[in-house]
Amino acid sequence: MDWQSILIAALGVGIGGGVGALIGKGLARLAPQGWRRGVEIGCAVVLAVIGARVAVMIAGPPSAGANPSIERQLLNDPTFGPMASAWRETDPASFDVYLGRVASAAGGNRAAAIEQARAELMEAARPRIPNLSDAQLVEVIRLARDQMRELKASHPIVCYPLFQGRRFGDISPYLSQALIQRETNLLTAAFRANPNAQQPALAEAELVAEINDLVARTRAQFGEDIALIAPDAQVEGREPRVCDAAAALYDQMLAMPEPQAAALMRGLSALSN
């Protein structure tokens, strides 16, 4: 069995159009030629987990009673407001350009403008995630692990599509408010992170070695059922075990020294650029 292939698929938590696409193309460069296209299309690593519910949030209606101003309505949004505020404070020039672009693209339709604003907010957050501190990037991994654990109990059927970056519907009813708040906090921190900080990141050759080691450790601890998180796995009737497999992978990442895990995350991100 091609365990490197399985790992690269396994590092895929997120959704197309959200934070999820950040890493997929970079990971594809590590894959053998025969399955490189499949990884590029379907894969998005653990950084994608924050924002995994973004598609649903974006599609939701604007807050009732909010000020007609797109900016004010966005800032008042309980989920997106902290992120928008952080962006406005740290880079007001690009934030103003963003608001102008959103308003223009919506053509006077305020509801459409708010949806567009939320979508572009997530796109702006995505490249900032690698600027997080080592501790915060490890918290991203922990968030991914904890999502899978909660979903195993509340809605296990969604673990596989969530893990593979596929459509999965609204999972917010199945996640605790505490977990959702942790996600919001990490995205807000990404906007406030210093983009000029020289953060350690693994180069491609080092990444391959780390990936192989991570796969070996996960297989030794979890067994052959780790194959349930492969892109072509047959998981019907075994959905709770898929949640376990994903959580086991993240547990092994969390067992790494904090600087090493964070450097792995940044290295994967850099490959997508």
Image: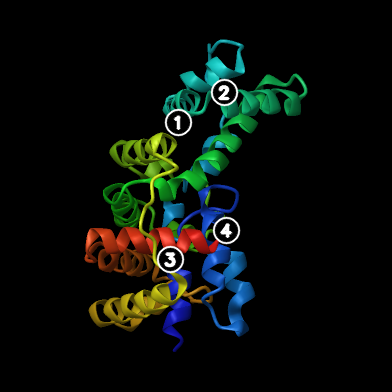
Nearest to viewer (mark 3 / mark 1): 1
Q: 28 left or right of 110?
A: left
The residue that disc 2 covers is 62
Q: Secondary structure at mark 2?
A: loop
> Which residue appears at 29% of the width and 50% of the height?
139
Nearest to viewer (mark 1 / mark 4): 4
Between 172 and 18, the residue placed more toward the observer is 18
Could you tell me the amino acid type at mark 2? Pro
Q: Earlier in the sequence, mark 2 or mark 1?
A: 2
Specify whether residue 87 is in view: yes
> Which residue appears at 35% of the width and 36% of the height?
185
Give the position of the C terminus as an image quadrant: bottom right
Q: 57 left or right of 188?
A: right
Could you tell me the amino acid type at mark 4? Asn
Q: Earlier in the sequence, mark 3 or mark 2?
A: 3
Q: Position of residue 251 (x, y in %)?
A: 26, 64
Between 196 and 93, the residue placed more toward the observer is 196
Q: Are marks 3 and 1 in contact (CB under 8 Å)?
A: no
Residue 11 is tagged as: 3
Specify whether residue 170 is in view: no
Q: Are marks 2 and 4 in contact (CB under 8 Å)?
A: no
The residue that disc 4 covers is 273
